[in-house]
Image (spheres, rainbow, N blue to C red):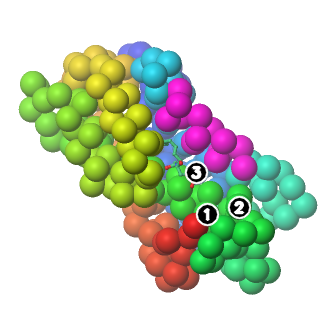
């Protein structure tokens, strides 16, 4: 493996998502949040224009960390135990916003949707030609996923921010996994783990009818 992966590179972040999946197929909250923190760190290396994008993710990570250090911390050990605990104690606004605007279930749903965007974007990057434009890859993957859940003004601001993305070469270098080829190989190896985390969460939420939480 290439030098330069000092712990802040994207490889470690993606490996953290691999460690989310427990043997019983539950998703462990702590590595999930750790993975997200790494993504935010990575995003912030691309300039202050991304801070408005990462700020909301940071706020949502903090909400979940508060649950993880509170009285009910054991109930939040996995996504599955969180869903079970919050639903059986009626701690989720199911139809419209109400008493629980920051439930764990709706907070994780936002991160889950954003993770899908990241997955689609990295997949597009992995399979892209050398002259591909990252802003186009990013906009297409955003429009195919997260944009459907965002108000017009957020979509506008996000799409503007994508124009400030570094070029494909710079983006791959920024991952700090070595040459472009090594970075692409790393994505190929890591993306199945992100996909798996996404799929398990999606089916958990679908099973409990939680995919449209307000
Ligand atoms: C290129 C790598 C991209 C990976 C990082 C993904 C971060 C995604 C955060 C997008 C946030 C855009 C601005 C915030 C919007 C919120 O309104 C929205 N939050 C999310 C995460 O989509 C919905 O949250 P809300 O308002 O219902 O609490």
Where does residue 20 sit, x and y in percent of width and height? 55, 55
Check the picture and name the quadrant holding the C terminus: bottom right
Q: Residue 157: which quarter of the image? A: top left
Where does residue 35 sit, x and y in percent of width and height? 54, 43
Asked if residue 168 lies left or right of residue 49, the reply is left
What is the C-alpha distance between the residues marked 2 and 1?
8 Å
Ligand 1 under 8 Å from disc 1 Cβ:
yes
Q: Nearer the viewer, residue 85 or 181?
A: 85
Residue segment shown in magenta: 51-63
Instruction: Name the element at disc 1.
Output: helix
Q: Residue 73 has which mark?
A: none
Residue pointed to by mark 3: 32
What is the C-alpha distance between the residues marked 3 and 2?
21 Å
Instruction: Name the element at disc 3.
Output: helix
The first of marks 2 and 1 along the sequence is 2
Residue pointed to by mark 1: 106
Q: Residue 57: which quarter of the image? A: top right
Where does residue 94 sit, x and y in percent of width and height? 62, 77
What is the C-alpha distance between the residues marked 1 and 3?
15 Å
Q: Nearer the viewer, mark 1 or mark 3?
A: 1
**Mark 2: few/some/many CA within 10 Å (<14, 14-19, 20+):** some
Instruction: Name the element at disc 2.
Output: loop
Where does residue 66 sit, x and y in percent of width and height? 79, 49
Asked if residue 204 lies left or right of residue 10, the reply is right
Residue drawn at 64 percent across, 47 percent down: 60
Q: Nearer the viewer, residue 124 or 156?
A: 156
């Amino acid at each position: 493996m290439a030098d330069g992966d000092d712990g802040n590179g994207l490889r470690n972040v993606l490996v953290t998502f691999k460690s989310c999946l427990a043997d019983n197929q539950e998703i462990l909250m702590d590595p999930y949040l750790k993975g997200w923190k790494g993504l935010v760190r990575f995003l912030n290396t691309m300039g202050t224009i991304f801070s408005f994008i990462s700020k909301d993710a940071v706020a949502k990570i903090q909400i979940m960390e508060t649950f993880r250090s509170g009285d009910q911390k054991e109930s939040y050990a996995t996504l599955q135990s969180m869903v079970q605990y919050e639903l059986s104690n009626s701690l989720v606004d199911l139809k419209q916003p109400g008493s629980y605007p920051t439930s764990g279930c709706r907070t994780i749903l936002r991160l889950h949707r954003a993770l899908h965007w990241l997955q689609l974007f990295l997949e597009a990057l992995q399979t892209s030609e050398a002259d591909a434009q990252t802003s186009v890859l990013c906009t297409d993957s955003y429009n195919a996923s997260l944009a459907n859940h965002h108000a017009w003004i957020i979509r506008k601001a996000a799409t503007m921010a994508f124009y400030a993305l570094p070029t494909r070469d710079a983006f791959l270098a920024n991952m700090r996994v070595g040459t472009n080829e090594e970075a692409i190989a790393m994505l190929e190896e890591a993306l199945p783990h992100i996909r798996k985390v996404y799929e398990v969460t999606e089916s958990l939420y679908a099973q409990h009818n939680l995919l449209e939480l307000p």
